[in-house]
Amino acid sequence: MTTELLTASFGLQASPKGSENPIVKIMSKELIIVLLVAPLVGFLINGLFGKWLKGNEKLSGWIGALAVLVSLVCSIIAFTSLNGGAAPLDETLYEWIAGEGFAFNIGFRVDALTAVMLLVITGVGFLIHVYSIGYMHGDEGYTRYFAYLNLFVFAMLILVLGNNYLMMFVGWEGVGLCSYLLIGFWYEKQSATDAGKKAFIVNRIGDFGFLLGMFTLFAAFGTLDFGTIFDAAEADNFQKVFGASTLVIATLLLFVGAIGKSAQIPLYVWLPDAMEGPTPVSALIHAATMVTAGVYMIARSAVLYNIAHTGEIVAWIGVLTAFFAATIALTQNDIKRILAYSTVSQLGYMFVGVGVGAYASGIFHLVTHAFFKGLMFLTAGSVMHAMANELDMRKMGGLKSKMPITHWTFLVGALAIAGFPFLSGFWSKDEILHGAWGSSPLIYGIGLVTAFLTAFYMFRLIFVTFYGESRVEPEVASHLHESPSVMWVPLAILAIPSALIGLLLGWGGHESWFHHFTKSVEGFSSEAHGEASGNIVLFMVISSVVGLAGIAFAWTRYSKRVPSDEPTGALHRLLANKYYIDEVYNALIVQPVKNGSHFLLWKLVDNGIIDGIVNGVAALIRFIGGLLRRLQTGLVQVYIVSMVLGIVLFLAYYLFFT
Amino acid sequence: MRGIARGRGLGATAVKAIAFGIGLITFVISLGLYTEFNADLATFQLGGTPIEWIPGGVSYHIGVDGISLWLVLLTTFLTSVCILAAWNSVEKGLSGFMMSLLALETGMLGVFCSLDLFLFFVFWESMLIPMYFLIGVWGGERRIYATVKFVLYTMAGSALMLVGILALYFQNGNSFDLTTLSGPFEHSDLLFLAFFIAFAIKVPLFPFHTWLPDAHVEAPTVGSVILAGVLLKMGTYGIIRFCLPLFPDAAEKFTPLIVTLAVIGIIYGALVAMVQPDLKKLVAYSSVSHLGFVVLGLFSKNPVGIQGSMLQMINHGLSTGALFLLVGMIYERRHSRMIVDFGGLSKRMPIFATIFMIVTLSSIGLPGLNGFVGEYMILAGSFVGQAFSKVYVVFATAGVILAAIYMLWMFQRVMFGTLDKTNENLPDLNAREIVVLLPILLFIVWIGVYPKPFLSKMEKSVAVVVTKVQTAPAMGQLEKQKLRDPKLALQGTLRTQHEKREKEAKQ
C-alpha cells in the first residue's frame, strides 16, 4: 500500500491498469481507513493529553487542524481517483454484531456521493478548525473544544462512509453526541446546556423513526447493507413478495430520522437554540455538515425512494419548512438566529430537491450551501469577536468601515444565498426549483416565494448590521477591529468557492459536471419524476429577478431604518415569537409529561397504588396474625376444650358425611 | 472464604487485602472458565461429575453453558470491583461487611452454576441472608423497612418457586437434575407462573418493582452495585434457564401479557426515573426500564433478540454498576444524593465528569458503547421475531428517547451549571477510584466496538433455548424455512448474488 502510494504520487512508474491516470489505483480500503482514523487520533491526543497541552494551546489547535488536513488530503485523493474512473469502493471491514443468520457489519462505500460529502466535510472542516484556533483563543476549554471538534469530524465521516444503514446510524448518533457536547460547550451557562439537551432529545425523536425504519428494512431484507437492499428492491419479484407497503413504510420512517437531524417541520426547534454553541461549531455542524445528514440519507436511499414514491412527501415537508423558517427569519434581530432559521429554510430546499427526484441538484445545493452558509456563520463569528459577543444587530450598524474584510465576505455569502446571478446559490437553488416545477408547480411557487423572502431577510441583516449609522455602544466601539489573520484568511478562502463553485460545477444545468460526476450513484440517474420540463434559462431569469427584488425591497425598508423593538402588528408579533411553537410544545408535551410522571405515575401509581397494595398485604397479614394471636391465651383449659371440640367435629364429619 | 474474612484479630488493611485477594483470585479462576469453555457445544461444561448430596435425588451438580458463563464472569468481576470500591467507606464491622460480600458472591455463583433444582433453590435463598445484612446493617436511615421489604418480597416469590420445583421433582421421576428435565409437564401453565412470578419479582418486572427503589436507596454503595449488577440478573437468568425451555407452550401463552408488562416497565420506569430528586432512586427506576428491555428480548423467540437480552444483562451490570459506584463516590464526598445539591461539578471534578459522561452515554445506548449493541439487538430481534406484535417494539423504541431525557437531564443538573459554594472543595477522583472504574470503562467500550467474543460464546447455548421456544424460523431450521417462505428464499439468493459481485469487484 505505501509503496503503491509512493509510486503513484510521485509518478515514478506508470501503473499497469490505469496508465491514463495512476491515481486511480490509490483508491483503497487502506486510504479510507487513514482518512477516517486521522481525526480520531486527533481526538485522542487532545482528549487524553489535554492537561499537558493546556499550556500550549496553539499546538493543541494545530494538532486538531492537522488531523483534519490528513483526512482532507485523503479525500482529495479518493475524489480524484473516482473522477479518474476508479470503481466505487464497497467493502466490509469486519463483522460487528454477528452470529448465525445475521450480520451487521462495519464497512465502507465510497462512490461519487460519498466523495462529494467527504470533500465538504474535510474541506470546510479544515478551514473551520484553522479559524477556531484564533476564535477560541484564551478559552478555558481550548483542548476540550478541539477534541470534540475532531470527534465530530470522525463521526461525520463514519456517517457518510458506511456501506450499511447501521453504520450510518452509528455516525448519526455520534454527530448528535458531538453536537450535544459542543452546543453545551460553555456548560456553566444554563441556556447552553438546555439547548444541548434539547438538541439531543429532539434528535432522538427522529432517531426513533430511523431505528424503526432500519428494523423494517432488516425484517424485509435480512440485512442492512446498501448493496443487498438496493439490489433486492430493484429485483423484479420484490414487489410480489413483499408488497409495495414495506418500502413506503421504511422510507417514511427513515425520513422521520432525517426530519430530526436536518431540522425540518415539526422537529426543527432544536436548531435555532443550537446557536448557543461557539460560532465555528454553528458553522461546521449546524450549517455545513451534520444538519445535511438527512439530505444525504435520502440521496443515499434514492433507489428506495424511487420505488416507494414517497419523495413527494419529502418535498412537501421540505418546501413548507423552507417557507415557514424563512418567515420567522424575517423578524429576528439576533444575527446567528437569522442564519439558523435560514439554514432550516435552505435545508428545506435540499429536501425539495431530493424529494422530487432531482438528487444531484439537492446534493449540489448541499455543497454550495455548506460553503456560503459556513462562510456567513464565520463572518458572524468575526462580528461577535469584534463586538464583545454582541448578537443583536440593532446594536450594530455601520460596521462596514471598521471591518471591511468581514463585510465583503459576508456580502459574498449573502449574494450567493439570495441567488444573485452566477453566484453559487443561484445555480443550485435554480436547479431545485426547476426540478420542482416538473413535479408540482405549487411546490415551485412556494419555493419561489421563499427565494424572495430569503433575499429580503438576508439583506435586511446586511443593511442593518454593516450599513447606516453606527449604533455600537461607546465602550465596545473603541475595541472595534478587524479579526486577526488566522480568522480572516479562512473567511477569504471560503468566499472564493462560495462565489464560484456553482459556476464551476453547475454550468450547463443537467449537463453540468456535477450531474455527470454523480450520475453513477445508485438511484440518481433514474430521476423518476424530476425530469424537468420548460426552458431552464427562463427559470434562471425568473429566479434572478425574484432574488434581486428581495434585495431591493430590503434596501427600501432597512437601508436607513432600524428594526423596531416592539412588534408592530399581530402578524409581526406572531413571527417575532416564532409562531409560539416552543411555547406550544412546552405546554402540550413537555409539561404534561413532566407533571404526569411526577404526580400521576410516581406519587399516585407507584407510591400510592402499587406500594399501597404491597404494604396493604403486609398490614392485612399482620392484622390476621393479630386476630389469631388472641387464640393463644395461655390457658390450658381453653386449649383442651378446643382440642376436644376439634375431635368431635372430625368424628362427626366422618360418621355422617362419608 | 467466610472463615478467612471473619478473623477478628486482623487489622482493617489485612481484612481488606484478604477480601480483595480472594475476590481477585476467584475472578482469575473464572477467567479460566472463559478460556476453557468450548463455544461449539451447547452443553453444560466444566462442572465435573455430580456428587450425591442428599439421597433421594439431590446432588451437587454444577456446570456452565454459554448463558451462565457470562453471569459468572460478571459476578466475579463486579465483586472484585466492589471490594476495592468499599475500601474506605465501611466505618464499622469491616470484617462482617467483607464476609457478607464474599458470602453473597458464593450464593450468586451457586445460583448461576447449579444444575440441580434443589441446589439452585438453596443458593437462591442463601444469597438473601448476606444481602439482608448488607442493607440492614450498613444501610441508610430506613434500612430496616427496605431490607424487610426486599427479603419478604423475594421470599413470597421463592415460596411459589419451591412448589414448582417440587412438582417438577415428582414429574421427573424423583430427580432434581435440570439436565434430564424434559417436558411436556402436567399443569405447565401453573408451573410456569410459579417460576415466572418468583423471577419477575427479582427482575423486577412492573408491577413487582417497588421493593427495588427502597432497597437501592438504603443499601450501601456496593450493595447497590451487586443488587443492580448481579441480583436482578438472577431473575432474567431464571427466565431463560427455566421458564422458556421447560414450559415453551406456557411461555407462548403468556407472552402477550408478559411483553405488555415489559413495555410498560420500559416506559413507566423511564418516566418515573425522570422525576426522581434522588440520584440513587433515579438509577433504580432506570433499572426497571432497562430490565424491561431484557425481558422483551427474552420473549422474542429470536436468536438476535435473546442474545441481545443476554448481552444487555452484562451491559446493565456494567453501566448501572458504574453509575451506582459514581453516585457512591459523590455521596462519600458530599453526603447527599439529592440532585438539587449539585450542579457545575464538571468544573471541579473533570475526571469524574468525563467518566460519568461515558457511563451515562453507555446507559443511553450510544453506538460505540455497550448499551447500544444490546438494545439494538433486542429491538431488532423482537421486531423480526414475530413472537408478538410490532406495536410493542414501537413503544419499546420510544423508551430509547426517554432514556436520553432522564439521563441527560440528570447529568445537566449535576455536572453543568454554576458550582455551588458548598461544593467548591470536593476533590476529584483519587487513584483507587479511577482503578475501580477503569476496567468497567474498558468493557463498556469493548462490547460497544467489538462484541463478537461475547456473542460467539453464548451463541450455541442461546440457540438451544431458541429451538425450544420457537415456532418461527430457528437458526438451524433456516434452510428448511427458506423452502417454504419466498421472502427468505429471495433474501438468500440476493445475498449470495451480492457477495459474488463483491468478490468479483475485488478481483
Image (tube, coloured by chain):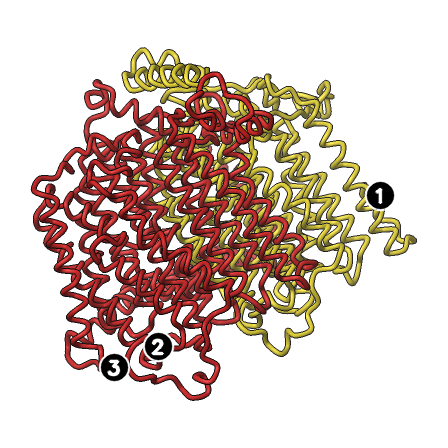
Assess whether mark 2 and mark 1 are in contact (beta carbons under 8 angstroms): no
Q: Position of residue A257 (x, y in %)?
A: 32, 46
Q: Measure the alpha-carbon separation of dots 1 and 2.
A: 73 Å
Under mark 2, the amino acid is: Asp
For label 2, the residue is A392
Under mark 1, the amino acid is: Gly
Q: Secondary structure at mark 1?
A: helix
Q: Residue furthest front?
A: A12
Mark nearer the N terminus (3 vs 2): 2
Q: Residue furthest bottom?
A: A474
Q: Position of residue B313 (x, y in %)?
A: 55, 39
Q: Nearer the viewer, residue B404 or A31?
A: A31
Mark 1 crowd level (few <14, some 14–19, many ≥20, 10 Å Cα):
few
Q: Measure the alpha-carbon separation of dots 3 and 1.
A: 84 Å
Please identify which colour was used for chain A in the image: red
Q: Secondary structure at mark 3?
A: loop
For label 1, the residue is B3
Q: Quadrant of residue A210?
A: top left
Q: Position of residue B300 (x, y in %)?
A: 41, 32
In percent of the image, x 46 and y 60: which residue is there? A489
Q: Quadrant of residue B118?
A: top right
Q: Where is A243 relative to A465, above or below?
A: above
Q: Nearer the viewer, residue A189 or B95?
A: A189
Q: Secondary structure at mark 2?
A: loop
Under mark 3, the amino acid is: Val
Instruction: Please tell me if label 3 and label 2 are on a single chain.
Output: yes
Which chain gets the yellow colouring? B
Q: Measure the alpha-carbon separation of dots 3 and 2.
A: 11 Å
Which numbered circle lies on residue A562?
Answer: 3
Quarter placement of the N terminus of chain B: top right
In the image, which is nearer the foreground, mark 3 or mark 1?
Answer: 3
